[in-house]
């Protein structure tokens, strides 16, 4: 696995910063309040989480004492192990992910042992909130979409929300074994309804986006779902659908062949009422 690194922090709203953790290109958020400093997502391992905490100490002379993880994918939350004595938050679906069992090969590649992976102290079902001292933070879960634990971190006073991998800016969103494509567009609708039209949205990967971008990606996900569901309705099996995708891109398809393949596997599993056999990478 490639070496971990983190970029410098860049201000994206007042006293609100973004850094990118490599090699996964994950956005790490930092919201500084009068009393507390909030980190959003933690990198891929406890060592990486510790590096992030150190960079905040060095650049801002602040100690992170609130941490939210946006969902149960390793590049966003395995760094949580570095934050033992602070208030940590995540969506309750993280526990389901843990109950499946940790990918020990991956953890070994990342350079630590599975016992360092622990759930957040505060598990959010639908809604949560806390204050950073004069700055209110809302946590919202709208149901299954990119994963089973996508938690939105909304900071109304900064006109900004961290949306994890509900949106991805550099390319198509990621469809994995724990994705529920049918409900994803509606989840994005609810995010926009919560934050309004003039809030900056920080995706899990890539540059911050506006709600117009979010609506375009939402519509692309819906078009993708409708196309593949139509093949399923016509009686095509998954292999037929994949063969159609391999034959080449149609103008009707919103995503690349690779992303359409991933989506088709998810959607067929969803329509069959089961999950595909593999775990998320
Ligand atoms: Zn993800």
Image (tube, grey):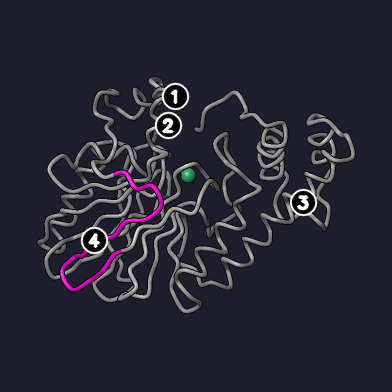
State the extent of the magenta-drawn residues as a range: 123-137
Do the residues under discs 1 and 3 have CB atoms within 8 angstroms? no
Residue 225: give x, y in percent of width and height: 72, 49
Which residue is the site of mark 2? 96
N-terminal-most mark, 2 or 3: 2
Q: Residue furthest bottom?
A: 198
Which residue is the site of mark 1? 100
**Image-quadrant location for residue 92:** top left
Which residue is the site of mark 3? 226
Which residue is the site of mark 4? 130
Residue 34: give x, y in percent of width and height: 13, 70
Do the residues under discs 1 and 2 have CB atoms within 8 angstroms? yes
N-terminal-most mark, 3 or 4: 4
Label 1, label 2: how many angstroms apart (C-alpha)? 7 Å
N-terminal-most mark, 1 or 4: 1
Question: Which numbered marker is on residue 269?
Answer: none
Q: For the residues carrying marks 1 and 4, which lies nearer the camera in this image?
A: 4
Label 2, label 3: how many angstroms apart (C-alpha)? 28 Å
Do the residues under discs 2 and 3 have CB atoms within 8 angstroms? no
Q: Residue furthest front?
A: 126
Quick one: label 1, few (<14), some, or many (20+) residues within 10 Å? few
């Amino acid at each position: 696995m490639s070496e971990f690194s983190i970029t410098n922090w860049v201000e994206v709203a007042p006293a609100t910063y973004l850094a990118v953790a490599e090699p996964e290109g994950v956005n790490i958020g930092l919201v500084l309040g009068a009393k507390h400093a909030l980190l959003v997502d933690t990198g891929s391992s406890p060592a990486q989480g510790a590096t992030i905490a150190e960079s905040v100490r060095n650049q801002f002379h602040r100690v992170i004492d609130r941490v939210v993880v946006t969902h149960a994918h390793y590049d966003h939350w395995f760094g949580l192990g570095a934050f033992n004595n602070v208030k940590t938050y995540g969506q309750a679906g993280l526990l389901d992910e843990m109950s499946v069992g940790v990918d020990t090969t991956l953890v070994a590649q990342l350079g630590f042992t599975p016992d360092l992976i622990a759930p957040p102290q505060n598990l959010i079902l639908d809604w949560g909130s806390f204050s950073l001292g004069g700055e209110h933070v809302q946590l919202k879960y709208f149901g299954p979409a990119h994963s089973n634990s996508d938690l939105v971190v909304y900071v109304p006073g900064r006109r900004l929300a961290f949306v994890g991998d509900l949106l991805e800016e550099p390319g198509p969103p990621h469809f994995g074994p724990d994705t529920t494509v049918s409900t994803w567009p509606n989840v994005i609708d609810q995010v926009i309804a919560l934050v309004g039209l003039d809030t900056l949205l920080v995706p899990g990967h890539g540059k911050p986006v506006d709600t117009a971008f979010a609506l375009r990606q939402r519509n692309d996900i819906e078009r993708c779902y409708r196309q593949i569901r139509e093949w399923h309705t016509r009686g095509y099996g998954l292999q037929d659908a994949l063969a159609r995708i391999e034959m080449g891109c149609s103008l009707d398809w919103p995503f690349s062949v690779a992303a359409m393949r991933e989506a088709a596997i998810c959607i067929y599993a969803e329509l069959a009422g089961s999950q595909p056999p593999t775990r998320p990478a």
